[in-house]
């Protein structure tokens, strides 16, 4: 009798209330209906079921979002077209190099009255030399560097400044500047980029893995090629400011890539069931809002500078605009397909 009562008590502890059991059955039934609905929807739209062979850890969340991975060929086509167009413009027109690379004319002018750099630049813009490099050496003295000038062009600048502001003659300096300075600039820029890439490779290698590090380098090289291509296509002036922009963009693009890599790594730790493409696609969808919000808040003031800035600021902001868009694009649409292709060729995660 005692043993029978004990067994009845044990059975009662394991029995769910009728309402809870009914609720559980309804949830299971609803889940099965939703899963069937999603499968029918995917079959009708021609989508490939990435979770074939087992239920996804993400449930239905992975199906209702954008399929980045399934459309990776379109992203590659877009990038290829832009880069090939840039190559065509490179052989057809070449870069529109600025004063730092071409050399030019240097004039040091003493004005008869104190003048601001904004006033001086406005006068230079009025005669088509808004991209001249202006350096203030005193309240009434400025160094003006321009592209190579003929005697007539030089006289136009001097006469315009004399009529509008007033200058003392003869000029303090009036000489030609050789383009040899560009070799130093180019060499230092290449050294800076090489050191940055090596540092990035080591950092991501230690934090993630070698394949993530190499993919990050490929993304950065992709961004550099895109920036070059847009400079070639738009024929914007390429100068030392452009090099500074490129170095800035490398850091921005890398930051975006690391955020995405970190999300993928976290998903790989907790998800051992789903395939690598599905995990990557889910990670991109989860990080998409953050990436787009960051890009939007960064790019808005840059667009304002492109519209209302002076010539120098427009060159700087143009490079930033292209670089920010390129960095966001490569982090989302270029790095992920490369990771998946690499894993398909050399499996480390579930295919």
Image (tube, rainbow, N blue to C red):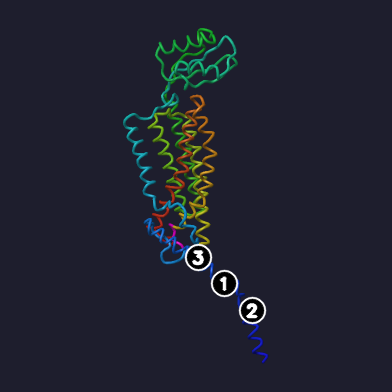
**Rendered residue at 45%/15% (across/down):** 127
Q: SS for tag 2?
A: helix
Residues marked 3 and 2 touching at CB (< 8 Å): no
Q: Which residues are magenta?
A: 273-277
Percent of width and height locating residue 146: 45, 19
**Circle nearer the N terminus (3, 1):** 1
Q: CA distance from mark 3 to mark 2?
A: 27 Å
SS at badge 3 = helix
Image height check: is 260 above or below 138?
below
Give the labeled residue for mark 2. Answer: 13
Residue reaching furthest to the right: 2
The residues tagged by marks 3 and 1 sit, at their Cα atoms, a distance apart of 14 Å
Q: Could you say which is closer to the camera, residue 146 or residue 306?
A: 306
Residue at image coords 54%, 71%: 25
* Pointer 1 residue: 22
**Within the image, what quadrant is residue 182 found in?**
top left
């Amino acid at each position: 009798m005692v043993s029978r009562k004990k067994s009845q008590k044990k059975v009662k502890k394991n029995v769910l209330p009728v309402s809870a059991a009914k609720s559980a059955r309804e949830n299971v039934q609803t889940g099965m209906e939703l899963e069937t609905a999603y499968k029918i929807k995917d079959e009708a739209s021609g989508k490939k079921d990435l979770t074939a062979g087992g239920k996804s850890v993400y449930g239905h969340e992975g199906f209702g979002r954008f399929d980045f991975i399934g459309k990776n060929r379109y992203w590659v086509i877009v990038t290829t077209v832009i880069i090939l167009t840039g190559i065509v413009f490179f052989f057809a027109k070449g870069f529109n190099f600025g004063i730092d690379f071409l050399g030019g004319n240097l004039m040091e002018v003493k004005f008869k009255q104190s003048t601001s750099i904004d006033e001086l630049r406005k006068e230079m813009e009025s005669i088509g030399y808004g991209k001249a490099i202006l350096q203030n050496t005193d309240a009434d003295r400025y160094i003006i560097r321009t592209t190579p000038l003929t005697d007539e062009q030089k006289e136009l600048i001097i006469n315009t400044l004399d009529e509008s502001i007033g200058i003392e003659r003869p000029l303090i300096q009036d000489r030609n500047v050789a383009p040899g300075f560009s070799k130093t600039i180019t060499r230092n820029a290449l050294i800076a980029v090489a050191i940055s890439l090596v540092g990035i490779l080591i950092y991501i290698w230690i934090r993630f893995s070698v394949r993530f590090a190499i993919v990050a380098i490929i993304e950065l090289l992709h961004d550099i090629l895109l920036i070059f291509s847009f400079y070639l296509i738009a024929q914007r002036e390429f100068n030392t400011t452009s090099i500074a922009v490129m170095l800035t963009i490398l850091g921005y693009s890398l930051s975006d890539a690391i955020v995405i890599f970190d999300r993928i790594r976290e998903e790989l730790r907790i998800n051992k069931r789903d395939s690598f493409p599905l995990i990557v696609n889910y990670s991109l969808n989860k990080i998409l809002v953050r990436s787009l919000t960051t890009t939007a808040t960064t790019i808005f003031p840059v667009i304002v500078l492109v519209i209302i800035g002076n010539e120098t600021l427009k060159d700087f902001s143009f490079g930033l605009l292209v670089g920010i868009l390129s960095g966001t694009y490569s982090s989302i649409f270029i790095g992920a397909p490369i990771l998946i292709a690499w894993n398909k060729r050399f499996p480390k995660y579930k295919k």
